[in-house]
Amino acid sequence: MFWLMVVKDHKAGRREFVPAMQVLLNRVKHGFWLISARNPYRKRIAAGDNGLFYVASKMGRVIAGTCQITSGVQPATAGIKSVIEGYPSNLLTHYFEIKGVIWANPIEAGKVVPNMSFVKNRERWAAYLQGTLHPILREDYELVLRYQSQQSAAT
């Protein structure tokens, strides 16, 4: 299966926030992705699945990289809990392992997400990306990879 994995800015205190890209870099460094025990897709996640990282931040919305999922979903361990950076991640109780790659040149999400098959209203494409995990079609995954390849070749 193929997944669009969403990360957003986190609150670390009353007036502090952790940028979404920092949260993503931390997760890739430690090789995990967090989800809720109530996530409707948790039972469908399996080793060998592939994902795209969507970053929604005050600094912009981008597709920032890819990953391969290397485990099924399991309860968060003490080690995972010790590297979680703020809200809303501190509410998530389960995780799966990943091997991720962050692109040097992320794609502006507005250039590619509106063209994905699950987006029915192209002007309001971001509304389709609530939550932390969304199944996508292989065609959507490949669309993003083609766009990223073209973008990299142009720079």
Image (spheres, grey):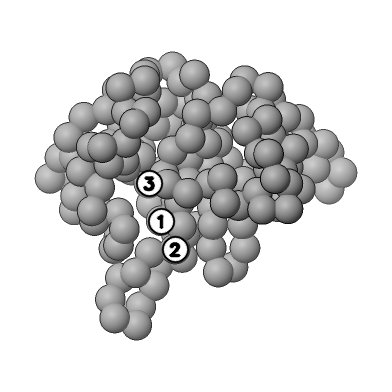
Mark 1, residue position: 23
Q: Residue furthest left?
A: 78
Q: Secondary structure at mark 3?
A: helix
- Residue drawn 53% across the image and 63% down it: 57
Q: Residues within 10 Å of mark 3 (few under 14, many from 20)?
A: many
Instruction: Report if the CB atoms under discs 2 and 1 are less than 8 Å apart.
Output: yes
Q: Are marks 1 and 3 in contact (CB under 8 Å)?
A: yes
- Measure the alpha-carbon separation of dots 1 and 3: 6 Å
Q: How far from the left and from the top, in percent, is residue 48?
A: 44, 17
Which type of secondary structure does the marked residue at label 2 adopt? loop
Q: Are marks 3 and 2 in contact (CB under 8 Å)?
A: no
Q: CA distance from mark 2 to mark 1?
A: 8 Å
57 left or right of 95? right
Please report the residue visible at 19 percent of the width from the left and 50 percent of the height from the top: 81
Residue 44, percent from left and from top:
36, 20
Can residue 102 be seen by looking at this rendering?
no
Which residue is pictured at 62% across the width and 63% down the height? Answer: 60
Residue that protrudes farthest toward the right in the picture: 154
The amino acid beneath tag 2 is Asp
Q: In this orientation, which residue lies closer to the viewer: 131 or 100?
A: 131
Residue density around tag 2, few if under 14, some if 14–19, many if 20 or more, within 10 Å: many
Q: Which residue is mark 2?
A: 9
Q: For the residue carrying disc 1, how many other residues have a C-alpha within 10 Å: few (<14), some (14-19), or many (20+)?
A: many
Name the N-terminal-most of marks 3 and 2.
2
Q: Looking at the picture, does residue 135 appear above or below residue 121?
A: above
Q: Which residue is mark 3?
A: 27
Q: How many labels were placed on the picture?
A: 3
Q: Residue furthest bottom?
A: 15
Name the image quarter holding residue 11. bottom left
Camera-near label (3 vs 2) is: 2
**Amino acid at circle 1:** Val
Identified at 48% across, 35% down, the residue is 134
